[in-house]
Image: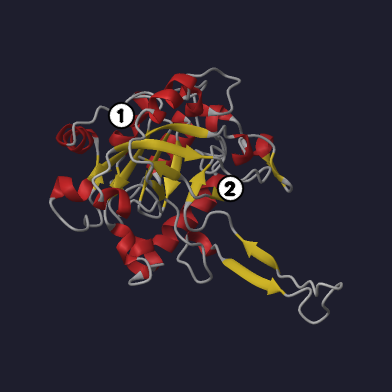
Amino acid sequence: MPDNLKHLLFILIVAGGSAGLASAQDWVPSRFGADDRIGAANNLSREAVLAAASLIQTGQVYSLGIDTEEGAPAYGGRTYDIDIIASGANVPVGADVVTSNDERVTTSFGIGSQIDGLGHLGIGNQYYNGLTAAEIVRDTGLAELGTHDIPPIVTRGVLLDMTRHFGVDMVSEGTAFNRAEIDAAASAQGLQIQRGDVVLFHTGWLQLLGVDNQRYISSQPGLGVEGAEYLAELGVVAIGADTPALEVIPFENPQRVFAVHQTLLAKQGVYILESMNTAALAADGVQAFMFVLGQPKFKGAVQVVVNPIAIR
C-alpha cells in the first residue's frame, strides 16, 4: 500500500478514535425508523425473490467470490494465514485406517470478497442510526450491527458494465461513477434499477490481482458520493464492484476519506460488496440475474468473507 493511502487510513483511524461524536441530525434516525438495525435489507421482499427467480432462463450459476489466500492484498494490515493439521496422518484410527485433515485459520474477515456490515465505518464514532462505538463495540464482537444479523439476500442483481460504457478493457483509477454515468450505463443496457436490487459494477480492475497487487489495492475506479446517494434513494440493498473498496480512489475530495463508505453504511444503511468477480457475467453479457447470499454467521463480525452466487 502506498504511503499516501497508509497516511489516509491512519487519519481515518485516529479521527474515529478521537473526534468525538459528530452531529448526526441529518441522517438519524434512518428512513426505516430509530430502532432499525438492518438498513436497506428492509427493501427485500418475497415479491422480489419471485421476480428474481423468473429471471432464471439457463440455469447457469456464477460464483462472484475470489479465492482468499495467504499474501492477498488487503487494507490496513489485514492478513490471512492457514495451517493444515494432519491429525490422523501419523496415527491411523480403526480397522479402516481413518486419517484426516483439519485447518487452523488466523484471519481478518475484511480480506478478499467481502460484505461490509453497518458497523464497519462510521462518522465521528457514530454508526448506522446514530449508534455510538461505546454502545456497540465489545471485545467479543459488535453488540449490534454485526454481519450475523444481515438477513439472507435473495433478490434481483444487476450488472452495470462500466468497461462497455467507457469503451475500454479496464476503467482507469480515479474514474468516478455518479448519477450521470450510472443512468447512461443502465439506459444503454436497457436496465431500470429498482427497489430491492443489488447493483454490481464491472470495471475490469480485478485483472490486476496477482499481476500488480500494489496498483490493485492502492487506487481504483469506483462509485462517487453522488452516485452512492442516488442508488440509496432508489432503494438498493447492496452495491458492489470488482474492486477492493467499491469507491473511487483517489477520492473525489482528498479531505473526505472513504466518504462513499460513510454515505452507504452509516447514513443510508446500504451494504457494500468488495472484490466481486464480475468478469464471467460481463463476458457472457449477463445484465440481470438472481442474486443469492447467505453470509456466514460469525456473531459480532464487522465484515465477513463471502461468495455470492448469480443465477441466470
Q: In the image, what residue occupies the spot 65% across and 43% down? A: 297
The N terminus, quarter of image: bottom left
Q: Secondary structure at mark 2?
A: helix
* Quadrant of residue 94 within the rendered picture: bottom right
Instruction: Please state the horizontal and vertical placement of residue 55, each as a whole percent of the image.
Output: 34, 31
Q: In the image, what residue occupies the spot 21% across and 55% down? A: 171
| Amino acid type, callout 1 | Tyr
| Amino acid type, callout 2 | Gly
For disc 2, the marked residue is: 17
Q: Secondary structure at mark 1?
A: helix
148 is higher (above) or lower (below) than 282: above
Residue located farthest toward the left when viewing the structure as drawn: 167
Label whose residue precedes the other's in the sequence (2 or 1): 2
**Residue 303, label in figure:** none
For disc 1, the marked residue is: 230
Instruction: Please state the horizontal and vertical placement of residue 16, each as a whole percent of the image.
Output: 54, 46
